[in-house]
Image (cartoon, coloured by chain):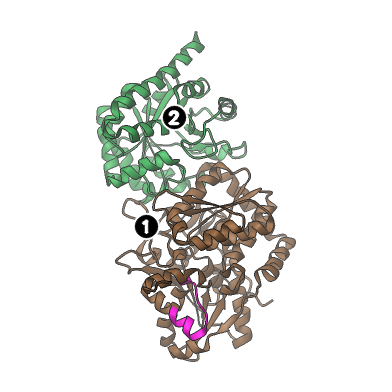
Chain colours: A green, B brown
């Protein structure tokens, strides 16, 4: 079983934890996320123009780039993580230009060598799949597409064709970190998606508290938290590891407790 | 009307393809949230193109509100001074709001109305597109929000006040370098969160398909008129067209109806800023292909695909990309792209003002500067049409500052 599938084979919903590569002490922060109970790491590739992100992740992108973080540095972060955590799934999340600038084949090779399990490219809809999709699939790396509140029944089959790993359900029509997702809307979206696919669904955008994570975990296969984590890094700088571990543990506990309640 | 002949199967005017690609450029690189909306927009645009009532309303507004056709002026004193080709100026500066931008805004607000959208948003750099958008929003009674970098808000106060007078809300964008690129990022962020009721009026031939195509089509009135006016004046086609290129909407508007006229040379002028080896905004001369703001095109970027800040004395050219159709026309060799520095543009600004009594926008001054190089190389039997894309009243403060004059 590959690492992404293994993350969804656990008895609880998977916790996908996001941080921006190169923002703070990334290796220590990643270890803290794993220690706290993250099942999937979403490692953000910083970009000068993060059009889908709210102020917190924009700032994280700028902090990382200001330190000179390069694509080579990011791949090295992944390679070192893979050596320390051979079983934890890691996906790169970012924008098309830094991923495609040297060509899809180059990027897919680099991902495969470093130990990346999947790629989420925010501004690469199925219509532009050719940019990265074929090269990633050829090397067994999941191309994780996004579905949103605007993805109606006519649109979903287009998104699902060629998707693998999981579907990232963007819970709010908006950018990261600003709005809060309502559990009712998440629940009806899950029903809509589950009716047409068996690929696991991870809910993200607008989930920041253990309570929200627990609520989403009741209906989804996984829950992604980003802005709340990035804000901790913004606040604690190079000393963010321990606060991150505590916060991640709170999220994981809340998600698992609810799940066990349901079973009991 | 004597417009360009119908496009043949091998026409340069058949782009983009059905997926919005101009050769390898263009496309739809947007967040999934926006995809249903831009697919709707494309379908609605196709329907509008086939609707004679839409065209009639567009023409009526261009004629009676914008003041079209704009004149084609034979700049005799400039031609004599340069001592070469005969120079004609397409006077887009005489349009309502003072530039070509209004042509596109009229077309897009008609689409917004057709789609039942309740409000419009736009990005702006110097404020020209913001003013044009606020103007049509006032005319159609729609609420309007303009995103403008905080640095541009500070240095373009008269346009900020104009937009507010017209009833628009102006949002000062504090992200990034606080200029046009960041304003566009913020407009896209806002759009994603308000897709259900909001129409985004993009100001240039960039962004996701179908924007580069529809903006071009609305701006093509420039070239269609110029072709007819030139034929009437000279009984033949011009030898060259010259236009400034930031995103490139005025340029493609002039060029497009002439693309299949093989004997007409087509020259776009990029902003070389302080020089191509220093800070500049020349995406073709100094950039390479990449993906930004919904399309693939030439961009100023580093090896890792991080976007560089552009620089030009002309705020309207101060953008690190160029419309995807220009990228394609460059690669296939149908158009040629040259560049002009801030200093050359400043000289051209003063020369045209003194010789013709026309104060050009700094954007347009770039095309005049290129003409100063090109016209003397051509014989007096040759003719050039230069797109005078806007008037320079907005720029007198920047020019005074550059010339060290206190006003």
- The circle on residue B309 is 1
Q: Residues within 10 Å of mark 2 (few under 14, many from 20)?
A: many
Quarter of the image for the C terminus of chain B: give it.
bottom left
Instruction: Name the residue nearer the viewer: A142 or A56.
Output: A56
Q: CA distance from mark 2 to mark 1?
A: 32 Å
Quarter of the image for the N terminus of chain B: give it.
bottom right
The chain that hosts pointer 1 is: B
Instruction: Name the residue nearer the viewer: B170 or B230.
Output: B170
- The circle on residue B394 is none
Image position, residue A156 (x, y; %): 57, 37
For numbered disc 1, what is the local secondary structure?
A: loop
Task: Inspect the magenta stretch and tell me whether residue B147 lies in it.
Answer: no
Give left or right: position of A183 versus A210: right
For numbered disc 2, what is the local secondary structure?
A: strand
Image position, residue B376 (x, y; %): 42, 87
Q: Note whether residue B334 is visible.
A: no
Name which residue lies at 26% across and 35% down.
A79
Q: Is residue B1 above or below residue A147?
A: below
Q: Note whether residue A193 is visible.
A: yes
Q: Residues within 10 Å of mark 1 (few under 14, many from 20)?
A: some
Image position, residue B91 (x, y; %): 57, 76
Stretch of the chain drawn in magenta: B350-363
Task: Inspect the magenta stretch and tell me whether residue B353 lies in it.
Answer: yes
Give left or right: position of B87 versus B217: left
Image position, residue B131 (x, y; %): 57, 61
Query: Are labels 2 and 1 on one chain?
Result: no
Secondary structure character of the magenta stretch overall? helix
Instruction: Name the residue nearer the viewer: B363 or B350.
Output: B350
Res. A132 image quadrant: top left
Mark 2 highlights which residue? Answer: A224
């Amino acid at each position: 079983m590959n690492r992404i599938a293994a993350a969804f084979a656990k008895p609880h919903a998977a916790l996908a934890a996001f941080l921006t590569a190169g923002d703070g002490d990334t290796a220590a922060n990643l270890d803290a996320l794993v220690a706290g109970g993250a099942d999937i790491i979403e490692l953000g590739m910083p970009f000068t123009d993060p059009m889908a992100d709210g102020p917190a992740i924009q700032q994280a992108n700028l902090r990382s780039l200001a330190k000179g973080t390069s694509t080579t540095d990011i791949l090295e972060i992944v390679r070192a993580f893979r050596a320390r955590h051979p079983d934890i799934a890691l996906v790169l999340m970012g924008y098309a230009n830094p991923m495609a600038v040297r060509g899809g084949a180059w990027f897919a090779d680099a991902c495969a060598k470093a130990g990346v399990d999947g790629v989420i490219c925010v501004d690469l809809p199925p219509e532009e799949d050719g940019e990265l999709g074929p090269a990633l699939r050829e090397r067994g790396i999941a191309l994780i597409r996004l579905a949103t509140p605007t993805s109606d029944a006519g649109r979903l089959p287009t998104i699902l064709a060629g998707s693998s790993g999981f579907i990232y359900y963007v819970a709010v029509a908006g950018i990261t970190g600003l709005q809060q997702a309502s559990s009712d809307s998440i629940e009806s979206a899950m029903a809509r998606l589950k009716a047409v696919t068996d690929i696991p669904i991870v809910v993200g955008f607008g989930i920041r508290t253990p309570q929200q994570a627990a609520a989403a975990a009741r209906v989804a296969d996984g829950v992604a938290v980003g802005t709340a984590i990035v804000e901790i890094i913004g606040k604690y700088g190079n000393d963010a590891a321990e606060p991150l571990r505590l916060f991640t543990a709170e999220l994981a506990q809340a998600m698992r407790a609810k799940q066990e309640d349901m079973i009991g | 009307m004597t417009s360009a002949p119908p496009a043949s199967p091998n026409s340069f005017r058949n782009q983009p393809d059905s997926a919005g690609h101009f050769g390898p450029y263009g496309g739809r690189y947007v967040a999934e949230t926006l995809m249903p909306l831009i697919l709707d927009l494309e379908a609605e645009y196709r329907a509008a193109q086939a609707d004679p009532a839409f065209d009639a309303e567009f023409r009526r507004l261009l004629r009676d509100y914008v003041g079209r056709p704009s004149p084609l002026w034979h700049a005799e004193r400039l031609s004599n001074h340069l001592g070469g080709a005969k120079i004609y100026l397409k006077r887009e500066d005489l349009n309502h709001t003072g530039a070509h931008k209004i042509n596109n805004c009229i077309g897009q607000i008609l689409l917004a109305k057709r789609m039942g959208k309740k409000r419009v948003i736009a990005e702006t750099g110097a404020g020209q597109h913001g003013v044009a958008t606020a103007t049509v929003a006032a005319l159609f009674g729609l609420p309007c929000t303009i995103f403008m970098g905080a640095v541009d808000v500070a240095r373009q106060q008269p346009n900020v006040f104009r937009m507010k007078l017209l009833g628009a809300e102006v949002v000062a964008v504090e992200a990034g370098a606080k200029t046009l690129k960041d304003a566009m990022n913020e407009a896209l962020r806002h759009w994603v969160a308000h897709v259900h009721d909001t129409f985004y009026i993009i100001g240039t031939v960039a962004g996701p398909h179908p924007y580069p195509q529809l903006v071009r089509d609305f701006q093509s009135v420039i070239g269609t008129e110029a072709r007819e006016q030139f034929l009437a004046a000279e009984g033949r086609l011009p030898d060259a067209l010259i236009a400034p290129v930031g995103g490139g909407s005025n340029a493609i508007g002039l060029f497009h109806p002439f693309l299949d006229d093989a004997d007409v040379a087509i020259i776009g002028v990029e902003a070389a800023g302080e020089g191509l080896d220093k800070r500049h905004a020349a995406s073709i001369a100094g950039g390479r292909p990449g993906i930004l703001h919904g399309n693939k095109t030439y961009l100023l970027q580093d090896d890792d695909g991080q976007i560089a800040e552009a620089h030009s004395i002309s705020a309207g050219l101060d953008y690190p990309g160029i419309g995807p159709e220009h990228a394609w026309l460059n690669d296939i060799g149908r158009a040629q792209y040259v560049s002009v520095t801030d200093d050359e543009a400043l000289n051209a600004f003063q020369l045209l003002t003194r010789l013709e009594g026309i104060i050009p926008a700094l954007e347009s001054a770039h095309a005049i500067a290129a003409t100063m190089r090109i016209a003397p190389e051509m014989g007096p039997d040759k003719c050039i049409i230069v797109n005078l894309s806007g008037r320079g009243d907005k720029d007198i403060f920047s020019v005074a500052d550059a010339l060290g004059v206190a006003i």
